[in-house]
Image: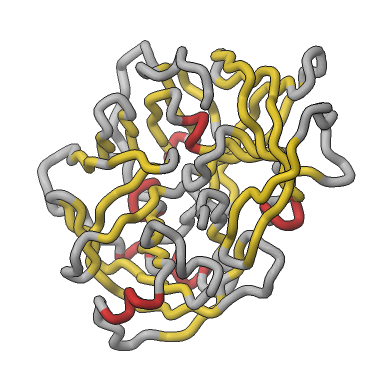
Amino acid sequence: MKDYTLRILISVIFAYAISLSTAHGQANSEDDPTVPFRLERSKIIIPTSINGSKPMNLILDTGMRFDGVYLFHLKALELIDTAGAIEVQVGGAGKGEAPKATMIESGNLTFDNISLTDQPIVVSHSPHVQTFPTDGVIGWSLFGHYQVEIDYDRQLIHLRDTNYVHNDSTWVTVPVTMKENLPFLDIEVEVVEGEVLPMHVYIDLASGDALELLVHDYQKFTMPDSLTKSYLGTGISGDINGHYGKTARLQIGGYDLYRIPTAFAPAEVRSKQGGADGIIGNGLIRSFNIIFDYPRSRILIKPNLTFDLPFE
């Protein structure tokens, strides 16, 4: 079952988890550590050990907006210490009710030679995610505490101090606005040729799609003529259905991309983010090497070796 449309929206535990961020453990490694990753189904996968477990395959997700990890499979509870666990409720993409989850206040995460301590662990009870091929997601534990550079060419993530200064002029700066720990940015989109529109979107690295546009009564764009009705994926609250098509052009940071595969998803099912016109997924972001610099409210991008390749 596809998990690329997963949108982690923690309704009950969000405020609680953010309060734990001051207890975030330091990366116990050399300066500017690197984390190897691999790409699967156009997602960034980081093998991560949790409380000494065998490595679990976690998606790097900009939508994971609190420290720790969110695990999809109940069987994970057999692998980790559950002392002091509490039951919470987690809402997300899909039509169903918010499912229950088990939350463990503090755990240890290890990837490669880096360890993070005092990390909350949330294990989903949702039946919709039990068959997902990956084990879970990780996000704010990295994005919220470091400058995060994703080098798709070498499949390495560089973690740098938030005070690090970049002097490389080959990177292009794109301003972002942080809304509830999600990075929003303004881009130019031409869904139908000749209809050039400014759009306010956010980045969702857990989405393998290149672009998702949210369909509702007040959308800015005209739907293209050639669309295919499709199952778009499954969120933690159920399935998402919509249409697939092509967007003629998209501009980000002065770079133009053409004929972009686009999911047209009902806004009320796909995203709970008010004011969003759409979502940029890893299917598009992977055309660039990218630095997430949240303290300075920006990302930095430069084309990588795949930039000139056509979208699949």
Query: On the picture, is 253 further left or further right than 221?
Result: left
Quadrant of residue 120 within the rendered picture: bottom left
At x 59%, y 48%, the residue is 179
Q: Picture coordinates of residue 110 (x, y %)? A: 20, 58
84 vs 303, nearest the viewer: 303
Total numbered labels placed on residues in the image: 0
Query: In the rendered image, is residue 308 in sight?
Result: yes
283 vs 205, nearest the viewer: 283
Query: On the picture, is 57 further left or further right than 290?
Result: left
At x 45%, y 34%, the residue is 296
Quadrant of residue 36 within the rendered picture: top left
Give the colour scheme of this rendering.
secondary structure
Q: Picture coordinates of residue 126 (x, y %)? A: 53, 74
- List the single residue furthest toward the right: 217
At x 33%, y 79%, the residue is 77
Q: Picture coordinates of residue 50 (x, y %)? A: 24, 66
Q: Picture coordinates of residue 81 (x, y %)? A: 25, 81
225 vs 44, nearest the viewer: 225
At x 57%, y 51%, the residue is 5
Q: Compared with residue 30, is residue 220 higher up or lower down, i.e. above or below?
A: above
35 vs 28, nearest the viewer: 35
